[in-house]
């Protein structure tokens, strides 16, 4: 086995380990701040950036199948955080827009979660904070690059 394969295997192992570690470290914080599940928070997050998207676009941006997006949207509508709007040009297209309540609630949840994460991170020494800052920025940039490269491959993204 070449050194490159060993390095790739190491990266794979590390990446597979990151999500459970993040979940373990911060999910209690998130769950104590809201009754919304992570998927609903992801939907609110993407709508807070784009304001209004079609169901298919939400699925594409979050790599979620449309039935799962529909279920999340239904729950968010009951909470009055988003609303469905028919596209005036094509009634078959259903757009979803975040409401003012959705924006306000999402920003409040995001702020509270950020404060709790900050409290945990502040317990680390300055060297570890700097290392985590640099490392997380690199990981984010590389994952975004991979995401862009694979955008056309996603089975959820059939949008032109």
Image (cartoon, rainbow, N blue to C red):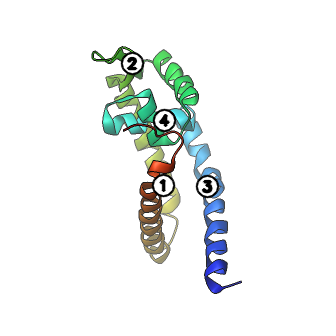
What residue is drawn where x is 40% and y is 30%? 105
- Distance Cα–Cα, label 2 vs label 3: 31 Å
Q: Nearer the viewer, residue 2 or 61?
A: 2
Q: Earlier in the sequence, mark 2 or mark 3?
A: 3
Q: Earlier in the sequence, mark 2 or mark 1?
A: 2
- Where does the image place residue 80, in percent across and percent down from the top left? 43, 18
Q: Which residue is mark 2?
A: 83
Determine whether, in the image, residue 123 is placed left or right of residue 90: right
- Distance Cα–Cα, label 4 vs label 3: 20 Å
- Distance Cα–Cα, label 1 vs label 4: 15 Å
Residue 100, above or below 147: above
Residue found farthest to the left: 89
Label 1 element class: loop
Question: Could you tell me if residue 128 is visible in this image?
Answer: yes
Label 3 element class: helix
Q: Nearer the viewer, residue 1 or 135?
A: 1
Q: Which residue is mark 1?
A: 150
In which quadrant of the rendered image does the C terminus lie?
top left
Q: Earlier in the sequence, mark 4 or mark 3?
A: 3
Q: Which residue is mark 4?
A: 59
Instruction: Single out the mark in the foreground, 4 or 3.
Output: 4
User: Which label is found at residue 19?
Assistant: 3
Residue 112 lies in what quarter of the image? top left
- Where does the image place residue 90, in percent across and percent down from the top left? 33, 17
Question: Could you tell me if residue 108 is visible in this image?
Answer: no
User: How many numbered marks have been drawn onto this rendered protein structure?
Assistant: 4
Instruction: Single out the mark in the foreground, 4 or 2.
Output: 4
What residue is drawn where x is 48% and y is 23%? 76
């Amino acid at each position: 086995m070449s050194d490159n394969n060993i390095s790739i295997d190491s990266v794979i192992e590390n990446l597979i380990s990151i999500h459970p570690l993040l979940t373990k470290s911060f999910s209690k914080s998130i769950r104590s701040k809201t009754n919304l599940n992570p998927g609903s928070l992801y939907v609110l997050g993407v709508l807070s950036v784009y304001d209004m998207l079609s169901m298919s676009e939400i699925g594409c941006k979050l790599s979620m199948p449309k039935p799962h997006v529909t279920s999340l949207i239904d729950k968010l509508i009951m909470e009055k955080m988003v609303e469905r709007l028919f596209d005036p040009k094509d009634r078959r297209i259903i757009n979803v827009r975040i409401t003012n309540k959705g924006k306000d609630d999402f920003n409040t949840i995001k702020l509270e979660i950020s404060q709790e994460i900050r409290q945990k991170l502040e317990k680390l020494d300055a060297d570890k904070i700097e290392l985590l800052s640099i490392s997380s920025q690199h990981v984010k940039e590389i994952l975004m690059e991979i995401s862009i490269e694979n955008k056309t491959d996603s089975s959820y993204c059939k949008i032109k």
